[in-house]
């Protein structure tokens, strides 16, 4: 398993390596880290080891700017959460937040240098329309989507189309589950919500339990068809695991939860790639236990080939001839796991041959 | 070494290969393109800018402008701007390649360079004091800038004023000045010697051509300037040029609205804008003729010198 010339995770594993970096290495590191959205977290990692002074002057501003952005975003996210809490209190829906928003709300290790694209909420499915209307009254409006996508969301997705605030740029995603209704594995969302706990020091805001949060990230890594920042998500997992590992009994609870949610194999892969890229410490017993969830050697080889490429930064300097194929394979795999063939085939047909001619990025 | 010292064939070769390393103000760029007209325009417009060997290892922004690799390019040639693999804009017709490159470069700066307070404003300097020109599009801001820099003012920037967050001074980014529609012919008429590249028509802003920045402005591109005035220009059909003091409160509001990263920098942006407003005089400026405006600005610059000498 190797990703060609991938420097971001190399520096996370071994920050001291930068002392031997040429300017050309710095050029590649900044570009790869920007693509992976990990500039700020990387800077934090270097600061932690007292190595930030080693960054050459020409490259430093890229890290500093990303770090300042991550910091100011955290203040914004907390402010938004306070407003959302009041809003949802009005309709008596508990505020449960997921992923980056949750790391910031709970001030976890995984919040360090984490840029937040959207605020992710988890609400009961039967309340999703009500939540949508309440948000709309507070100026959160659906992002313009083509008709096909809107229909698809309503019918099959586990979340509503994104909502953007009219004046602020913040985007909210309202989820009622962590995987789509059509997925083959489908953790029970009501159960996840029932185990969510209020954040100490942030009354009215709840996050998933430690194990559920980690399993959620694992499903994002291995089941999300829209995974934009694979390496960042894997780095989240790494930090969540390192922090959780200090809690007593964590690993056995994680294994039990994974089994119960039918996610043991997903967890097997997630830990495997966390170890590969970030050297995440995983106890031997845990690895032995998960070995029973491992696929056949042939499948594992194929998965390694796909995911070590797919999770690397989407930058040409860390791609090889197989990367485009690997990314495509990961996309098809996640679709396969999320949708039965009677949905998958028409969907891929539409995305390949109809959507590209309907939807274009914003004009210059 | 300056870009104009590169032989045209070598420039084309570098540009089509690994890209040309170029320094504009505080930023280093690596520009890659297989389009011959882009090479010609770059050579003409960026001739005075510093280039380094293709092996120069670090660049802030790696950009390219190339036709997309699909069959349609034979029928309906288009170009794509790419920032290190990311394509923030939809493709444009091939004739607009150079314009798109300039827009793309501005985007790179405005989307990333938060170490500055970035104001959507032009900047010019004379006698050590800078005028920041803030105006919505269509007020003749670029025309005025072109007129001023062709009459001895130093070009700081045509559309992106980079304010140092510590000192409040303006860091130059003297890239080519973007002229639109009627102002292209106007500038050609008042300064027949000035170099403008070929006009690209039917862009989102209408007809567009770029004016080569003066040699002296490029030579001094690493020399920040102290803000002296914040001026809100407005072109009117007739009448004498009028320079009227404007309330600092109103100017402040207008300035913050034109700062790209105001909300982004939060309280820091408020502080930088407040300092800027306090150290600069604010004016509304109405003008109809370019020669009169230049005279009015020269007068302003001269009075600043005498008042400084008087103190």
Image (cartoon, rainbow, N blue to C red):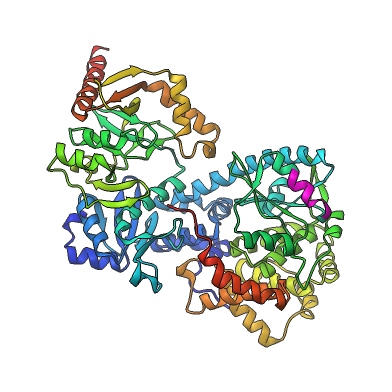
Q: Nearer the viewer, residue A133 or B153?
A: A133
Judged by its main secondary structure, the magenta piece is helix
Viewer-closest of A3 and B138 = B138
Residue A132 belongs to magenta span: yes
Asked if residue A54 shows in the view, the reply is yes
Q: From this viewpoint, which residue is outermost toward the left? A: B193
* Left or right relative to B49: residue A47: right
Q: Please tell me which residue is depicted at 23% across the width and 26% down the height of the picture.
A: B293
Q: For the C terminus of chain B, which image quadrant?
A: top left
Q: Is residue A204 above or below residue A260?
A: above
How many marks the image carries: the answer is 0
Q: Is residue B170 above or below residue A363?
A: above
Tell me if B9 is positioned left or right of B67 in this view: left
Rendered-image quadrant of the N terminus of chain B: bottom left
Q: What residue is at 76 percent from the left and 69 percent from the top? A: A182
Q: Position of residue A232 (x, y in %)?
A: 60, 60
Q: Position of residue B231 (x, y in %)?
A: 34, 26
Residue B141: image location, x then y, percent: 31, 34
Seen in the image, is A242 located left or right of residue B293?
right
Q: Residue A264 sits in which quadrant?
A: bottom right
Q: Which residues are magenta?
A: A126-133
- Does the magenta run of residues contain B89? no
User: Where residue A158 sits: x, y (%)?
Assistant: 74, 61
Residue at image coords 30%, 69%: B17
């Amino acid at each position: 398993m190797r990703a060609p010339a991938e420097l971001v995770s190399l520096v996370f594993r071994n920050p001291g390596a930068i002392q031997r970096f040429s300017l050309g290495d710095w050029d590649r590191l900044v570009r790869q880290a920007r693509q992976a959205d990990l500039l700020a977290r990387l800077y934090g990692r270097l600061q932690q080891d007292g190595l930030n002074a080693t960054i050459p002057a020409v490259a430093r501003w890229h890290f500093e700017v990303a770090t300042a952005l991550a910091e100011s975003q955290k203040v914004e996210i907390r402010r938004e959460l306070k407003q959302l809490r009041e809003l949802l209190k009005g309709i008596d829906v508990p505020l449960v937040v997921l992923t980056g928003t949750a790391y910031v709300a709970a001030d976890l290790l995984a919040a360090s240098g984490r840029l937040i694209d959207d605020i992710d909420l988890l609400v009961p499915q039967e309340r999703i329309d009500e939540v949508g209307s309440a948000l709309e009254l507070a100026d959160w409006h659906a992002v313009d989507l083509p008709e096909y996508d809107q229909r698809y969301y309503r019918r099959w997705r586990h979340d509503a189309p994104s909502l953007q605030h009219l004046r602020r740029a913040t985007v909210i995603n309202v989820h009622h589950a962590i995987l789509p209704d059509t997925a083959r594995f489908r953790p029970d969302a009501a159960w996840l919500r029932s185990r969510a706990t209020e954040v100490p020091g942030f009354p009215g805001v709840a996050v998933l339990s430690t194990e559920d949060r980690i399993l959620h990230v694992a499903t994002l890594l291995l089941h999300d068809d829209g995974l934009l920042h694979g390496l960042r998500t894997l780095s989240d997992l790494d930090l969540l695991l390192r922090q959780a590992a200090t809690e007593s009994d964590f690993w056995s609870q994680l294994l039990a939860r994974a089994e119960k949610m039918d996610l043991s194999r997903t967890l097997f892969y997630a830990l495997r790639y966390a170890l590969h890229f970030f050297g995440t410490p995983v106890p031997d017993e845990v690895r032995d236990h998960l070995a029973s969830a491992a696929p056949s050697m042939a499948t594992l080889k194929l998965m390694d080939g796909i995911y070590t490429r797919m999770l690397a930064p989407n930058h040409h300097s860390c791609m090889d001839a197989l990367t485009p194929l690997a990314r495509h394979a990961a996309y098809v795999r996640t679709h396969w796991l999320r949708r039965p063939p009677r949905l998958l085939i028409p969907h891929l047909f539409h995305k390949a041959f109809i959507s590209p001619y309907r939807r274009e990025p914003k004009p210059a | 070494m300056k870009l104009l010292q590169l032989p045209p064939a070598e420039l084309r070769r570098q540009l089509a290969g690994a890209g040309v390393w170029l320094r504009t103000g505080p930023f280093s760029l690596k520009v890659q393109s297989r389009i011959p007209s882009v090479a010609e325009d770059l050579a003409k417009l960026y001739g005075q800018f510093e280039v380094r060997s293709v092996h120069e290892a670090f660049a802030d922004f790696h950009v390219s402008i190339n036709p997309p690799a699909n069959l349609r390019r034979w029928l309906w040639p288009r170009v794509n701007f790419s920032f290190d693999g990311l394509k923030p804009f939809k493709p444009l017709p091939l004739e607009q390649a150079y314009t798109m490159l300039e827009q793309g470069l501005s985007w790179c700066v405005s989307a990333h360079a938060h170490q500055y307070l970035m104001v959507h404003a032009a900047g010019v300097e004379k006698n050590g004091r800078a005028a920041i020109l803030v105006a919505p599009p269509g007020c003749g801001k670029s025309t005025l800038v072109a007129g001023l820099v062709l009459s001895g003012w130093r070009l700081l920037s045509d559309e992106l004023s980079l304010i140092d967050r510590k000192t409040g001074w303006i860091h130059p980014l003297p890239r080519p000045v973007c002229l639109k529609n009627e102002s292209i012919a106007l500038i050609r008429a008042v300064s027949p010697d000035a170099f403008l590249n070929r006009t690209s028509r039917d862009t989102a802003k209408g007809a567009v051509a770029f004016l080569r920045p003066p040699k002296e402005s490029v030579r001094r591109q690493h020399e920040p300037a102290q803000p002296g005035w914040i001026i809100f220009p407005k072109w009117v059909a007739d009448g004498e040029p009028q320079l009227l003091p404007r309330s600092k409160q109103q100017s402040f509001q207008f300035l913050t609205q034109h700062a790209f990263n105001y909300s982004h920098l939060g309280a820091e942006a408020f502080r930088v804008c407040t300092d800027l407003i306090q150290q600069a005089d604010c004016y509304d400026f109405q003008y109809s003729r370019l020669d009169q405006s230049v005279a009015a600005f020269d007068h302003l610059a001269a009075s600043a010198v005498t008042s400084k000498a008087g103190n």
